Image: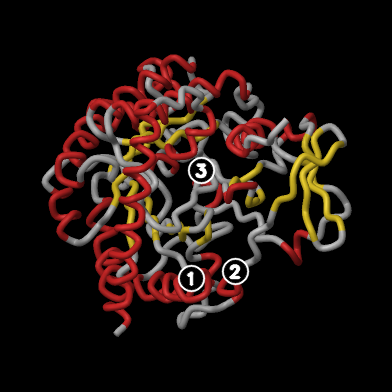
Amino acid sequence: MKLNPGLLKLDLFCRGIKIDASCDLSKDARPVLRTRGGLGSGLELILPKGLYVNAPIEEHFVKKTPYTLIKKYRDYFIKKNGHIICRIKLPARPKFYERMTTSGKLMSRIGVMQGTYLGIYPAKVCEFWQMGKKMNCQFCSVGLNVGNTEEYEKSVEEVLETVKAAQKEEGITFVHFNTGYLFGEELSILEPYIRAVKKETGLLVGVQCPPSPNLSKYDYLKKMGVDHASFCLEVYDRERFKEICPGKDKYIGQEKYWDAIEYCVKIFGKGKVAGEIIAGLENPLDTIKAIENFAKIGAISTVCIFRPCLGTALEALVPPFPEDMTPVFKKMYEVCLENRIPIGIAPNVKVSLVILPEEGKYFFQNFNINFFIMECKLSILKLLFRIYFRTRIFLKCK
């Protein structure tokens, strides 16, 4: 049977992978860095068709996985139940990880490669972790990482040096900034970082923060040159939202997420705003409702698979079954076609922590005329944007 890399990516998210003694990850792979992302804790792999996946290797459920990573000569392969199913690649450890900023900090403690982009959590830890009675999201591990495996705070100069190093050595096109809850000051805190990166590099910039209480701030964000905005709703079902995200429920509320997403679509445009949802924390039908509602207002969905990270309140739980998730990702792609939302346009942006909307085609079987028309349009848009982006970078570097 022909391998479906999308299904394999999903399966690895849900089941993880064991590491055979033949592997030499310290030499051949990116290090496993528990930084920034509340659900990022695994090994970066490049599957067939160039799909990146951050595969769990440490969590308790991995003991039962049918998958094993092995090395034969210089190549890496994935075995399932003892049989080799495909050859894969390991993205190499970035050289800039070992470099120091002018201030003397390791760059790997400032920003990390996730897929093909650089992720940076520039501000102090989310305030939900700091309250007398912790109000942090139950799945999140950010409070275990910031100040431990990464710097507690990063200066603009430290971030800019790290971004430039990643641009030069890794060829990144996209920098993603995110913060936790900081009493509504998130965008103001990010502003100097955004300005510096846009001015000095011309790279694409994405921002992921709790919704601002003042929606007009997103107009200002757009004027600064931000290319993409995303919002972590996490859970669609209201009762589960209260249970899983107590701080977000008490201090923000779901309505503000929907208001911010809708407002940003109007100023950034279709496909440039994302609503993030975590599949596996609620009934899949509720996750599908979130995806459909995001699409109706012109936003794409970024869907994470729930990962019970070590040290979190939910570490004893298990990820969802892959077969229960297949309809979710099929719907994620389907609604983009139905609502004519452009996806996968940005050059060299491949994400390892989620299944991207354009990767939803691996779960889609109804290849009708609308599918082929949409794919042709997307191919043209990708080419045009690639030319535009390269021209912009060229002019910036002159």
Q: Are marks 1 and 2 in contact (CB under 8 Å)?
A: yes
Residue at (65, 25) in percent of width and height: 318
Q: Amino acid at mark 1?
A: Ala
Q: Is residue 8 above or below residue 162?
A: above
**Mark 1 vs 2, N-terminal side:** 2
Callout 3 crowding tier (Cα within 10 Å): few <14, some 14–19, many ≥20 = some
Q: What's the mark number on residue 42? A: none
Residue 205 visible (yes or no): yes
Q: Mark 1 and mark 2: span between their CA atoms?
A: 8 Å
Callout 1 crowding tier (Cα within 10 Å): few <14, some 14–19, many ≥20 = many
Residue 41 visible (yes or no): no
Residue at (38, 17) in percent of width and height: 237
Callout 2 crowding tier (Cα within 10 Å): few <14, some 14–19, many ≥20 = some
Residue at (60, 45) in percent of width and height: 53
* Residue of label 3: 38
SS under mark 1: helix
Quarter placement of the C terminus: bottom left
Q: What's the mark number on residue 94? A: 2
**Mark 2 vs 3, N-terminal side:** 3
SS under mark 2: loop
| Rendering coords of residue 235 (x, y %) | 41, 25
Camera-side residue of 356 and 190:
356
Q: Amino acid at mark 3?
A: Gly
| Rendering coords of residue 278 (x, y %) | 47, 30
Q: Is residue 238 above or below residue 279?
A: above
Q: Mark 1 and mark 3: span between their CA atoms?
A: 22 Å
| Rendering coords of residue 9 (x, y %) | 61, 38
